[in-house]
Image (cartoon, grey):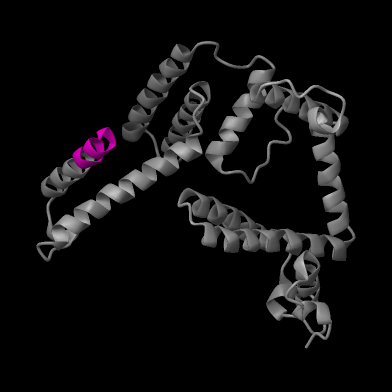
Amino acid sequence: MPHDPLIFAPDGSITRLRAIMRALRDKDTGCPWDIEQDFASIAPYTIEEAYEVADAIEHADWPALEGELGDLLLQVIYHAQMGEEAGHFTFDSITRAISDKMLARHPHVFGSESRDKSAEDQVQDWEKVKEQERAARDKGGVLDDVALGLPALMRAVKLQKRAARVGFDWPEIGQVLDKIVEEARELTEARDSLGPAERAEEFGDLLFVMANLARHLEIDPEAALRAANAKFTRRFHAIETALAQDGRRPEDSTLEEMDALWNAAKAREKHNAAR
């Protein structure tokens, strides 16, 4: 059992958490599961915890957010510990790098530049700084450092934004809409004449153009889809609630009845929103 008193100090803060992680990863006295992990095996948990943070925010569940932020922080500590063990980096080098980056990217706060700029002006300045950083890292291709691990819709938008910076973009939203019609037609044709792989490819093309439309409309497609998921869940729950009043479940109903209940739930939502 670890004897470092810091591990059991309630007010040990981030130093305590780092000590706990070191103890968990100790090859002689640590946890066998934690010892076996590497960057690749932990990465999915890191992504999952980030989504759970977003979910707590979406539900305005602040007690849950406190716990989820702790879980996400643990992921950072985990990766930092593994990086230190492998000699790649340390927790201190991580915090130093991000601190230096924040200073460099906010000259209007920490430097001599004027703060008399809009949020949009500052976003444009941020992008210029990031472009300079990418050039300094000698990233040859325009799209080379768009992270592969991003959610597909988010990555699609980032790829399109990056390409648009060098002029590879439709100037008019009508052209994007025309492309959606074209891709939808090709998907319909693929349904009847092509195999599963070709159908999946055509479906991916359509999703990619839909992400482009979202970008042109200044809509976050991930957020829009989350909202659509929440709306679907809410209205389907209304169907279940209505059927339960008769002692039934959805599988005891018909599509026509459920569709009518769905429309009733939709009408109630619109009425309540208009009040």
Toward the bottom, the furthest residue is: 1
Please state if 188 lies on the left or on the right of 94 as rendered. Answer: left
- Above or below, 16 relative to 98: below
Residue lying furthest left in this view?
246
The residue at the point 60 percent across, 53 percent down is 50
Q: As displayed, is residue 201 above or below residue 173?
A: below
Which residue occupies 56% across, 54% down? 53
Residue shown at 78% from the left, 78% from the top: 7
Question: With 125 as the anchor, is 261 left or right in this view?
Answer: left
The quadrant of the image that shows the C terminus is top left
Q: Residue at x 62, y 31 (%)?
A: 158
Q: Can you name the residue that lies furthest to the right here?
A: 87
In the displayed structure image, the side of residue 146 where residue 173 appears, left or right = left
Q: Nearer the viewer, residue 231 or 41?
A: 231
The location of residue 52, given as percent across then percent down, is 54, 56
| Snapshot quadrant of residue 146 | top right
The number of numbered badges drawn on the structure is 0
Q: Nearer the viewer, residue 222 or 242?
A: 242
The magenta stretch spans residue 269:
yes
Q: Main secondary structure of the magenta part?
A: helix
In percent of width and height, residue 211 lies at: 50, 30
Spot occupied by residue 58 in the image (x, y as percentages of width and height): 48, 49
Q: Position of residue 208 (x, y in %)?
A: 50, 30
Residue range highlighted in magenta: 267-275
